[in-house]
Amino acid sequence: MFSATDVDDEIRMERLKGLLVDCGVFDQAELLVEKARVRAESLADDVDVEPLRRLLYFLVDTVLADEDEAGIPVPTPEDVLLSLPVAQ
């Protein structure tokens, strides 16, 4: 059962969400995420080590993924396991 304060909180949250939508906050946030995604992909493109580049792209696709995308990418061992040089 909802109390009066729960209803008041819900009303406040709806008003706040409406104000944020009216001010374009969510649209601006989406633009910033897209800008960050483009920059991150550009940086990943400059990496010469193929396994590291794939890992960086996986992270970009996971962390900066569109909310509308159907599924979250599933990492393969090649995406997350890197062979490191061993000093002798």
Image: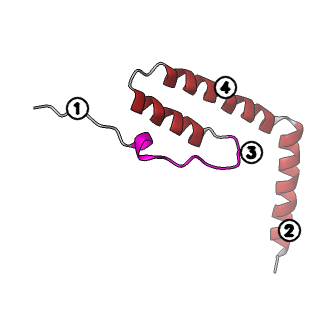
Q: In the image, what residue occupies the spot 69% across and 40% down?
A: 66
* Front label number (2 vs 4): 4
Residue bearing the label numbered 4: 35
Label 1 Cα crowd, 10 Å radius (few <14 / some 14-19 / many 20+): few
* Front label number (1 vs 2): 1
Task: Read off the magenta span.
Answer: 66-80
Q: Earlier in the sequence, mark 1 or mark 4?
A: 4
Element class at badge 1:
loop
68 drawn magenta: yes
Residue bearing the label numbered 3: 68
Residue bearing the label numbered 1: 85
Distance, label 2 to label 4, CA atoms, is: 38 Å
Element class at badge 2:
helix
Residue 51 screen position, x and y as percent: 40, 33
Element class at badge 4:
helix
69 drawn magenta: yes
Distance, label 2 to label 3, CA atoms, is: 30 Å
Identify residue type, mark 2.
Val
Task: Name above or below for residue 60 compared with residue 14.
Answer: above
Position of the C terminus, as image quadrant, is top left
